[in-house]
Amino acid sequence: MNTLHLILDGWDLSDEWLAFADQLPTYQTPTLNLIKRFGACQNHSNNLMQYTFSGSLKALILQDLDLPPDTPSCLAAPVSQFMDMNSMQVISGEELQLSWSDAHRLCNLLNDFVKDDGWQFHPYHADLWLLTMPQNQDWQAADIWSIKNRMNHTHTIDGEDAAPIRTLLTEMQMLLFSHTLPHRQALPPINGVWLWQDTVGVGVEKTTVMGNAIWLPEKDNLLINNDFSWEEICRLADNQPHITLYSNHAQQHLQQGGLKQHSEFIENFDKNILSPAYQSLKQGVLKTLIITGKKRTYTLKPQSHWRFYKKKQSFSGKI
């Protein structure tokens, strides 16, 4: 491979964690520190999922579902939501631990509710659906990844047809609230759906994607567990010029085990993935290494490590 792009979701701690800086662990990430020091840094405002594909996500899903590309539709995500003092907490994606059978059960329930209007939910992943409709409508909303687990007054649905969409969301929430799944008592309840028009990817058009990106068809979800290894990446990347690897396992460890598991995962990733990738870059085997976090992207070339004049950097919860 000529280029490796590592998208590290969940490595950047939220402001709630960073507010207690004196309680944060001292991360042992020597390779990431070198990457932060020598890499050409660029700020960005994209959500990290956007780097895993190019163009319209809705178009990709329509194609995979064998639906005409001009089918009026929008994207949908099942959510678990509850109110706190100032905003609505929203759980989505893999955190829901929603099974395929439950996804189909919920879509069938919702389809019985909206079928008279010609609408239909199509489960694409357990936690990512497509909603088709008789005609396109004029409304806009942030995608589920932009919400970042917390919905507030800035996350509104706007446009000429916004009112009926907001009504539909409220009605679906009431429907789901009255149809709980008993076997999910220990899991977040599915009590809502979020709709948005589309997400436009900013990734490289011709790239091989690895990792646990929510939109990937199962056949392309090459690395779906925590056991990333450099050898496996190189094997799967054989003869592929551009590799994009997406991982949100750091976020999962933070939610499940707190800072200890979060730091352990990051330190192991630094040792087992970043270190051999950086050595491969220095040797000229890898031509470009790109690291993308929540707000910054670092790009390195084989000669980048000669910039000794650059100040030393350290990872302390923010890439």
Image (spheres, rainbow, N blue to C red):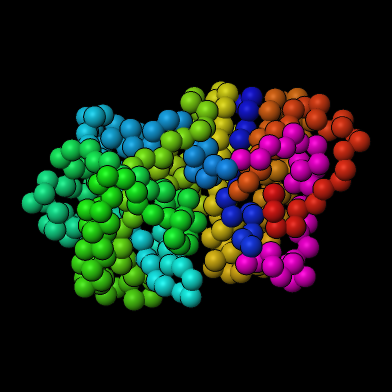
Instruction: Describe residue 243's horizontal placement relative to residue 272 as left or right.
Output: left
Residue 271 at what x, y percent from top left? 73, 49
The structure residue drawn at horizontal position 27% and vertical position 75%, both measured from the top left corner, is 182
The structure residue drawn at horizontal position 91% and vertical position 36%, both measured from the top left corner, is 309
Instruction: Describe residue 269's horizontal placement relative to residue 101 as left or right.
Output: right
Q: How many marks?
A: 0
Residue 242 at what x, y percent from top left? 57, 27
- Residue pushed farthest front? 160
Extent of the magenta region: 16-44
Instruction: Describe residue 113's horizontal placement relative to residue 219 as left or right.
Output: left
The structure residue drawn at horizontal position 69% and vertical position 53%, both measured from the top left corner, is 318
Residue 231 at what x, y percent from top left? 63, 39
Query: Is residue 97 visible to us here?
Result: no
Does residue 76 show up magenta in the picture?
no
Query: Is residue 316 visible to us here?
Result: yes
Does residue 20 show up magenta in the picture?
yes
In the rendered image, which quarter is residue 92 located in?
bottom left
Residue 77 at what x, y percent from top left? 34, 53
- Front position in the image: 259 or 77: 77
In the rendered image, which quarter is residue 2 located in?
top right
Say which quadrant the N terminus sits in: top right
- Front position in the image: 226 or 85: 85
The structure residue drawn at horizontal position 43% and vertical position 63%, both measured from the top left corner, is 90
Instruction: Describe residue 169's horizontal placement relative to residue 200 as left or right.
Output: left
- Residue pushed farthest right? 309
- Residue pushed farthest left? 116
- Does 67 appear above or below 163? above
